[in-house]
């Protein structure tokens, strides 16, 4: 399940670009599904390092999106029962599935230290980002 180094570097570039240019994007990462096991693996990230490199399907916001295939916008992370905290500063989160040939193969995950940070424009923008990334996968 190890991506090509060039692919990983490009995805790292996307994370860095988003995290450094959009002030309320405090943490940006791509979690990608394992080929054979129901787990998500952190391929690249920008922001404070996280301990959660591997997330089982169904666990946390990310794990739920792995099975729902739907965008998940969380206005207040503290109101979520099935949530994995990476930083005490995080207040809201958005996870957008990444599709390749119609299959949900991973996701982009953004954390914000601002409450209710993510709008429909963010969702549309991040869907577009994922479409661009899917083309190099
Ligand atoms: N909060 C996520 C876990 C990943 S960290 O935000 C980097 C979740 O609940 O799935």
Image (cartoon, rainbow, N blue to C red):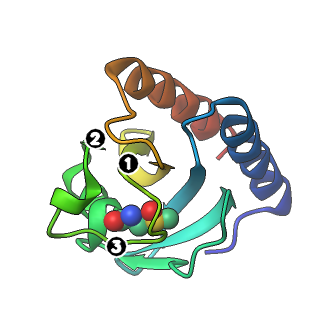
Residue at (72%, 30%) from the top-left corner?
Answer: 21
Q: Secondary structure at mark 1?
A: strand
Neighbours of disc 1 within 10 Å: few (<14), some (14-19), many (20+):
many
- First along the sequence among labels 1 and 2: 2
Classify residue 64 as left or right of residue 9.
left
Q: Position of residue 68 (x, y in %)?
A: 20, 52
Q: Is mark 1 within 8 Å of ligand 1?
A: yes
- First along the sequence among labels 1 and 3: 3
Name the residue tied to disc 2: 73
Q: Are marks 2 and 3 in contact (CB under 8 Å)?
A: no
Name the residue tied to disc 3: 84
Classify residue 67 as left or right of residue 17.
left
Residue 104 seen from this side: yes
- Quadrant where the image shows the N terminus: bottom right
Neighbours of disc 2 within 10 Å: few (<14), some (14-19), many (20+):
many
| Picture quarter with ligand 1 | bottom left
Q: Position of residue 57 (x, y in %)?
A: 29, 72
């Amino acid at each position: 399940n190890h991506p090509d180094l060039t692919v990983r570097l490009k995805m790292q570039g996307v994370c860095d670009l988003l995290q450094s240019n959009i002030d309320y994007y405090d943490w940006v990462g791509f979690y990608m599904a394992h080929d054979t096991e129901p787990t998500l693996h952190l391929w690249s990230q920008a922001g404070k390092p996280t301990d959660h490199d591997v997330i089982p399907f169904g666990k946390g916001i990310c794990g739920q999106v792995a099975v729902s295939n739907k965008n998940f916008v969380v206005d207040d992370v503290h109101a979520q029962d099935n949530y994995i905290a990476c930083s005490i500063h995080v207040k809201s989160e958005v996870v957008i599935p990444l599709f390749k040939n119609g299959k949900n193969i991973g996701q982009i995950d953004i954390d914000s230290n601002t409450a209710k940070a993510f709008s429909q424009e963010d969702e549309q923008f991040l869907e577009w980002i994922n479409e661009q990334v899917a083309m190099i996968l």
